[in-house]
Amino acid sequence: MNVVSSVGIIMANKQLMSSNGYSFSFATTLTGFHFAVTALVGLVSNATGLSASKHVPFWELFWFSLVANTSIAGMNFSLMLNSVGFYQISKLSMIPVVCVMEWLLHNKQYSKEVKVSVLVVVIGVGVCTVTDVKVNAKGFICACIAVLSTSFQQITIGSLQKKYSIGSFELLSRTAPIQAVSLLVLGPFVDYFLNGKFIANYKMSSGAILFIILSCSLAVFCNVSQYLCIGRFSAVSFQVLGHMKTVCVLTLGWLLFDSELTFKNIMGMIIAVLGMVVYSWAVEAEKSSNGSKTVPHIKNSLTEEEIRLLKEGVDTNSVKDVQLVESKV
């Protein structure tokens, strides 16, 4: 669901925002539309009883929404101020940043195999996406803010689900309204700063409206599947999955939009996919290893407990037998 919806929304937005399409260059406001539709779906779901609204303190929801919106704005500013090459490098840095954050915040350890596979994925995606690399001070600061806030947001999704025993969709339905309101209020001003155009001056056409509806519909599936993936797996796995989407976008761009696909791109994609396969194997091997280590310990504890209970049972039965004999005598 996440790969299909994410790739689909990128293709729809490409048609919506490109100069050859409908030139709708208001990315932050469009994201506000996405969360507004997601919030509406969550409201309808709760009202019809398809999902339950669980309690999460408002200050945690507000803090999470603030971090998430900072991530969105930071990514937009990073893309505007930096070259495409440096923007891709900043996105590649999210995996090691997420790993370090999870180690610092949750003391999570990673096996050598997982670390090597992640490195292979990063190298592969870097080979097929990174081209010109130009850095400036403002762009570097925006990229750092974007990477840190995005990584922290994705880790927090999993933490909140575990902390409050709340499902992925339930958490999304609580955070989406806050993000929608803030993005729809501030989004037009952010977009005006980014491209010098105000959304009120945009001449809306039926084709643009159709693609906005398509983009918002796909965004619901994209948002839900993101929360599901992070809640079920981890933020690191979701980042690896994100690079799989990059490979899909490059391939579909070549098939649908006549984008150039060089030998370097193809080799990078092959390396990235191999890294993802190795990552999947490494994660499963790590789970099996942890399982084999924990099961014997539990079994030994149970055995000792059983032995103790059996001894107590024998002693008790002996006493009862003696008492029974004495009473008969």
Image: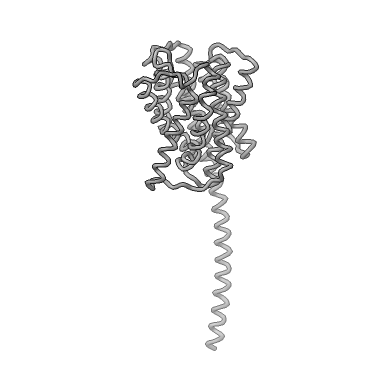
Residue 191 in the image, given as x and y percentages of width and height: 52, 21
Q: How many marks?
A: 0
Residue lying farthest to the bottom in this orientation:
329
Residue 255 sits in quarter = top left
Query: In this rendering, does residue 70 appear at all?
Result: yes
Relative placement, left or right, of 116 versus 33 is right
Query: Residue at 49% of width from left, 20% of height from top?
Result: 198
Quadrant for the N terminus in the image = top left
Decide which of 220, 58 is in the foreground and name it.
58
Q: In this view, does 131 lie above or below 105?
A: above
Q: Is residue 224 left or right of residue 112?
A: left
Report the coloring of the rendering.
one colour
Q: Nearer the viewer, residue 195 or 70?
A: 195
In which quadrant of the rendered image does the C terminus lie? Answer: bottom right
Residue sitting at x 50%, y 34%: 181
* Residue 117 seen from this side: no
Where's residue 171, x and y in %? 49, 41
Which of the 4 image quadrants contains residue 37?
top left
Q: Where is residue 104 in the image (x, y as percent from the top left)?
A: 64, 36
Residue at the front extreme? Answer: 201
From the top left corner, tell me how far across and down residue 193 is, in percent. Answer: 55, 19
Front residue (pair 216, 269): 216
